[in-house]
Image: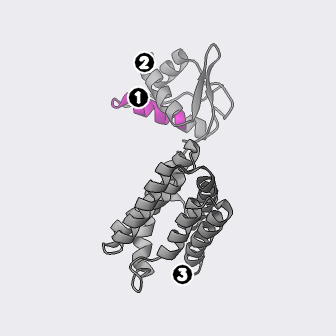
Amino acid sequence: MTTPLPPLRPSPLAQQAAERIEQQIRTAVWPVGGRLPGEVALAKELGVGRSTVREALRTLAAAGMVQSRQGSGVFVTADRPVEDWPARLRRAELVHVYEVRTMVEVQASRLAALRRTEADLVAVEAALAARQAAGEGDDAAFVDADIALHTAIVAAAHNPVLDDLFAQFAPVLREHLVALVGVFELRAMDRNHGYAAHAELVRAVREGDAERAGRVLAAELEATRARLLTD
């Protein structure tokens, strides 16, 4: 038997109902895998209408905590809100993001070397030229141009899943890299930091050399990851 829930304060009822139900789930009164009481029972315990209960359950479903199964009821699927991928990336340490970025981009560069079209090569060459030109600008403009080049290479792999993964990484990378370029003074001696490696990467993609493209990019990303670990 569940513990009766105390009545709610007026406003906003659906939010309060969701919070109360979440509290019962967190304390395992309604454990993961179990079925919640029906709408009528929940409405009675919370002292609200069924429409308020339904709205509260929709909120919890959106947070990944409950799931409605037609004909069976509403079941508990997690004891706390499920953090979405962008939020987890924002919270992650940059060195960990770089480790996963390496896995994604190195394979993407290999595929780009094998699959690139003439249109892709035009876009990649233009992005490399824009990165070089951005060397005359501030750190934010330089980082934006660098990420645009990497985005063009990932796009040349013609894999929509890789496109989506890199699109999730890009905002987090930009935020951190703008700061890191300044902190490490990467452009103090060379305004176009890393240009030679990026030009070599583009050459490998243009020449269809998948092994060299992956090797060049892996070395470039590993150099940054090593710096993050030591500085």
Residue type indicated by callout 1: Ala
Majority secondary structure of the magenta segment? helix
Is residue 15 located in the magenta-colored stretch of the structure? yes
* Residue denoted by label 1: 14
Distance between the Cα atoms at labels 2 and 1? 9 Å
Model colouring: one colour
* Residue denoted by label 3: 231
Q: Earlier in the sequence, mark 2 or mark 1?
A: 1
Along the line of sight, the residue nearer the viewer: 82 or 94: 94
Q: Dot 3 lies on which element?
A: loop
Give the side of residue 47 with respect to residue 28, left or right. left
> Please, which residue is most extreme toward the bottom here?
189
Image location (x, y in percent) of residue 227: 56, 78
Which region shows up in magenta?
10-22
> Disc number at residue 51?
2
**Quadrant of the rendering where the C terminus is positioned:** bottom right
Image location (x, y in percent) of residue 104: 61, 55
Residue type indicated by callout 2: Ser
Q: Nearer the viewer, mark 3 or mark 1?
A: 3
> What's the residue at 64%, 57% (across, down)?
110
